[in-house]
Image (spheres, grey):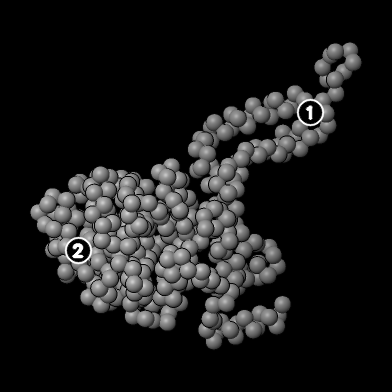
Amino acid sequence: MSTTRTILICSGKGGVGKTTTTANLGIALARQGAKTVVLDADFGLRNLDLLLGLENRIVYTAQEVLAESCRLEQALVKHKQEPNLALLPAGNPRMLEWLKPKDMQAIVALLERQFDYVLIDCPAGIEDGFKNAAAAAREAVVITTPEVAAVRDADRVIGLLNTKGVQPVQLVLNRVRPKMMSNQEMLSVDDVTDILALPLLGLVFEDEQVIVSTNRGEPLTLSDSSSPAAQAYGNIAQRLQGEDIPLMDPSQARLGLRARMRKLMQTRIF
Amino acid sequence: MTLKEFIDKLLRRQPASAETAKERLQLVLAHDRSDLNPELLEQMRREILEVVARYVEIDLEEGDVSLETEDRVTALVANLPIRRPVVKPANGGTL
């Protein structure tokens, strides 16, 4: 019985930060000493290579490994700055039809022999892509933002994961805007965890640095940035490893000068 | 936030949007999770009202049968304001 943790990173809605989370969590786990592989199972529209800055180094994919036209070691792309992290692209986007649940299980079985963590970056939605990606997952992290459409779609995915017996299923609440939350113009952390009835693995504040790091192909967690999002991903990785790290408190988020002034003025009025 | 929205909020003319979002989500998820189509739900509502109306006089305008959900468990909640019990006439006739 392998002790590898194979975790599906999924959401219902697209664009909520699955791939960003996979990349940053992969780097953070690797930095904490865990041998980690990130598997891009969104092979129709793959992007994990781009976010990790590895897009120019892909030669083989899981497809060739399964066809036995290359060894697994040849297909794994090691990260330059973080040798504990490797990427395995699931397949060539031009050949969408190859990957079936059993292919996924075969690939993950190979990876579980040599890694501590297998993170599967799942495609959005609940169609075949999701089902294939989920076939080999033992546990899952569902990413959502505090928006009605994202929460509703997350609920569908959680329902499907429950029927497949994947557990534990934990939640990452992404793109939290502390100011909007305190103004009650954004679903609160409790609102979302109550509605979805999932334990919260972490929350990530909206952070412009995420865009900058994506542009550069250097995940935030790599550049040892003190940005709130980088800290959040670091915390999430530690919690995955079983450490007891307190959650960030949106009401204690650092406020800019203008926001502080406005808050001061509001306190005077009310 | 526009000035008008700010004033509305200040005067509590309009609830903060997070509250509205939560209520809307709870409703839509109750329906998603139960997988009942609206037609079936409407038929159920009518029949429940009919049964209850045999025993008590209810306010059909105010009566409401809806799905509510908590902790991933969905419940059918009937809220039926009772006007008064149906009086069974002594002579066996109807009202």
Tell me, yes or no, if residue A158 can be seen here.
yes
Give the alpha-carbon distance from disc 1 to disc 2, as whole Å: 72 Å
* Helix, strand or loop for disc 1: strand
- How far from the left and from the top, in percent, is residue A80? 22, 75
Residue at the far right in the pictured view: B90
A269 on left or right of A183: right
Tell me, yes or no, if residue A207 can be seen here.
no
- How far from the left and from the top, in percent, is residue A70? 11, 57
Q: Residue beneath label 2, please?
A: A76
A60 on left or right of B26: left
- How far from the left and from the top, in percent, is residue A40? 27, 59
Quadrant of residue A6 in the image? bottom left
The answer as to whether the residues below labels 1 and 2 share one chain is no
The local crowd at label 2, few if under 14, some if 14 to 19, many if 20 or more residues have their Cα within 10 Å, is: many
Q: Which mark is residue B76?
A: none
A127 on left or right of B12: left
Query: Height in image: A105 above or below A261?
Result: above
Amino acid type, label 1: Val
Q: Residue beneath label 1, please?
A: B56
Which residue is at 77% across, 25% downward?
B55
Which residue is at 20% across, 49% downward?
A96
* Helix, strand or loop for disc 2: loop
**Closest to the observer, A241 or A257:** A241
Image quadrant where one finds the C terminus of chain A:
bottom right
Quadrant of residue A58 in the image? bottom left
The answer to whether mark 1 and mark 2 are in CB contact below 8 A is no
The local crowd at label 1, few if under 14, some if 14 to 19, many if 20 or more residues have their Cα within 10 Å, is: some
Amino acid type, label 2: Leu
- How far from the left and from the top, in percent, is residue A154? 45, 53
Which residue is at 60% across, 30% downward?
B44
**Closest to the observer, A122 or B12:** A122
Judge depth for marks 1 and 2 and give the one in front: 2
